[in-house]
Image: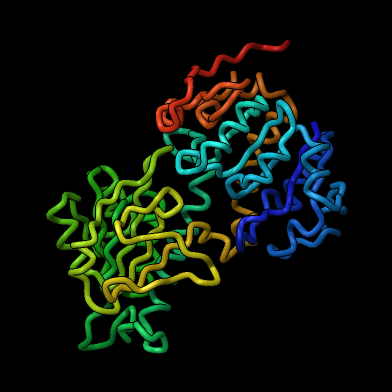
Amino acid sequence: MRIGIPKETLLEEKRVALAPAGVDALVKSGHNVFIETGAGLESHFPDDEYRNAGANVVYTAEEVFQRAELIAKVAPLKDEEAEMLQEEQIIFSFLHLRIGKKNIIENLLKKKITAISYELIEKNDQLPVLQSMSEIAGQLAVEVGEHYFKSDHEAGRGILMGGITGVAPAAIVILGAGVVGFNAARAGLARGAQVIVLDKDLRRLRRIENLLSKSVTTVVANPYTIARGVKFADLLIGAIQIKGEQSPHIVTEAMVKTMKKGSVIVDASIDQGGCIETSRPTSISQPIFVHNDVIHYCVPNMPALVSRTASFGLTNASMEYILDIADNGLSHSLMGDAGLAKGVCTFNGFCSNETLAETFDLEFRRLHIFSTN
């Protein structure tokens, strides 16, 4: 199979879909890989590393799209990328179509693209590809909060995350006990903060207590406890993730107004719309805004801050699916892996994701795969 890796064009997206190790595995399995020149530079993978792994380095995104049967990306499709897609291609990426533009989906349908969204692929009741990025986002959320606590930022509260003898540590309140929340809680504990995690699911709260000890305070989430937690927080981390759907605004602007002046919000759910009413997407170069005297950090592609680690993580998590399709064909892979099939959003000209179809008033058809053997 011919696999294409274009350079990411999203503002300040520094990750690459496959590290050289992934390319090496594909080439050794007999496949051809076409990568756009410079695609890995922001992750410190020069073109020569890809050449040495057996890739064909090409000089335009158009050539990548024209020559490939399967496109591997990181960020959601932009209009110009959707236009470059070829009839009946396969695309793997974090597509986030639920909060995207309808014309992108219409282009996928018109061209009969098999669009597989990384964030929807399931395995053993988990989201394995998304999880690799969520681990990073959880750790970075605490680092970001700690950075903006400092007095060298105009709005910073001037507090030390771990406190000192006789002075209390910072209070980190985490909304959601999933992968982002767990990793944020672990990072916060390591820095000596007081960590409080809220979630509706008692099983998730028990898991955090069992793995991170009773040093973490766990609270069942409801409007009353959320409002109390928001008011208490020095750092509020939004870590709500609902598979394939827009995150609900569980923190209202009225709640944000009760927060301490100079406290920090990191909305790690912003790539799905955000779980805090006052959030709006920001960028790596302009990551924050201050609203109601509260610092908001809402960067959708936060793992791009550690692009090399993130690219390795994405490669590790996605390679088994890409290699399976390349080795055995799309039909065989989808028939043999129900979790992979759940990631398919469009197939053969129809929307195969019910939530997406309802959102954009599209015809929904369940995925029907027939063996080509």
Q: Is residue 277 above or below residue 332?
A: below
Estimate the x, y position of residue 86 in percent, counting from the top left. 74, 32
Q: Residue at x 64, y 24 (%)?
A: 333
Q: Is residue 368 above or below residue 53?
A: above
Estimate the x, y position of residue 350 in percent, counting from the top left. 56, 21
Q: Residue at x 28, y 76 (%)?
A: 293
What coloring was used for the rendering? rainbow
Is residue 129 shown to the viewer in this render?
Answer: yes
Q: Is residue 204 above or below residue 41?
A: above
Estimate the x, y position of residue 109 in percent, counting from the top left. 60, 27
The quarter holding residue 46 reads bottom right
Q: Is residue 191 above or below residue 335?
A: below
The quarter holding residue 310 reads bottom right
Q: Residue at x 37, y 55 (%)?
A: 182
In-image side of 110 versus 268 (left or right):
right
Residue farthest toward the front in the current orientation of the protein: 103
Q: Nearer the viewer, residue 205 or 149?
A: 149
Estimate the x, y position of residue 12 in percent, counting from the top left. 61, 63
In-image side of 249 versus 104 (left or right):
left
Q: Nearer the viewer, residue 212 or 337?
A: 337
Is residue 128 shown to the viewer in this render?
Answer: no
Q: Residue at x 71, y 36 (%)?
A: 85
Looking at the rendered image, the quarter that the N terminus falls into is top right
In-image side of 69 versus 164 (left or right):
right
